[in-house]
Amino acid sequence: MQARKKPTLPDGTSVIVEVLEASQVFGNFGPQLAIKDKVVGGKYAGFEFMDWSKLSRDPKSNEVYVELGTKAADIFAAAFGDDYDADGEHNPEDLVGKRFMARVGLAGKKQDRNRLEYGTIGSDPAGHEAA
């Protein structure tokens, strides 16, 4: 058996993704929004990858929240488009089935995984939601 590098999308690729799974997780980097994305349409249709976005924690109450102006907030805003309410609940599970566009970058010490690039995340121009 041979070892090989996990496939990745080329750095800077623009894609429309559908959220397959979403959850709040805790790890070495504190609370995070973990989402499993699948590329829909185009040359890379069907490609799946994970993305993690930092969540914030209130130092007094210990409450975890989505801080406005962060990548996690951009994901929620893009996924819900005109229906997005920054003051509303931000439940990760509500992202499942939503679509949005973003540019994909490479991450990890060895540049061996994909990530959604902060600042490139926006609503799906076609306005589609998974059926």
Image (cartoon, helix red, strand yellow):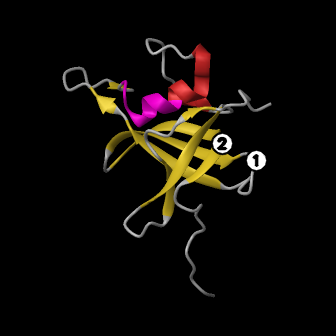
Instruction: Specify whether 95 is left or right of 25.
Output: right
Q: Is residue 119 left or right of residue 42?
A: left
Q: CA distance from mark 2 to mark 1?
A: 7 Å
Q: Amino acid at mark 1?
A: Gly
Q: Amino acid at mark 2?
A: Ile
Q: Earlier in the sequence, mark 2 or mark 1?
A: 2
Does the stretch in magenta take in 18? no
Name which quarter of the figure residue 109 lies in: bottom left
Q: Which residue is drawn at the image coordinates 73% and 30% (left, top)?
A: 126
Q: Residue at x 56, y 42 (%)?
A: 102
Is residue 108 toward the left or the right of residue 129 in the image? left
| Residue 63 locus on image (x, y percent) | 31, 23
Q: Which mark is residue 81?
A: none
Residue numbers of the magenta segment: 68-75
Q: Position of residue 52 (x, y in %)?
A: 45, 45
What is the number of the mark on residue 16?
Answer: 2
Q: Position of residue 46 (x, y in %)?
A: 73, 53
Q: Residue furthest right?
A: 131
- Label 1 neighbour load within 10 Å: few <14, some 14-19, many 20+: few
Residue 58, horizontal then vertical, whole percent: 25, 24
The residue under label 1 is: 41
**Residue at the spot x=66%, y=31% of the render?**
98
Residue 22 sits in quarter: top right
Question: 50 above or below 9?
Answer: above
- What element does badge 1 sit on? loop
Asked if residue 74 is among those painted magenta in the image, a careful observer would answer: yes
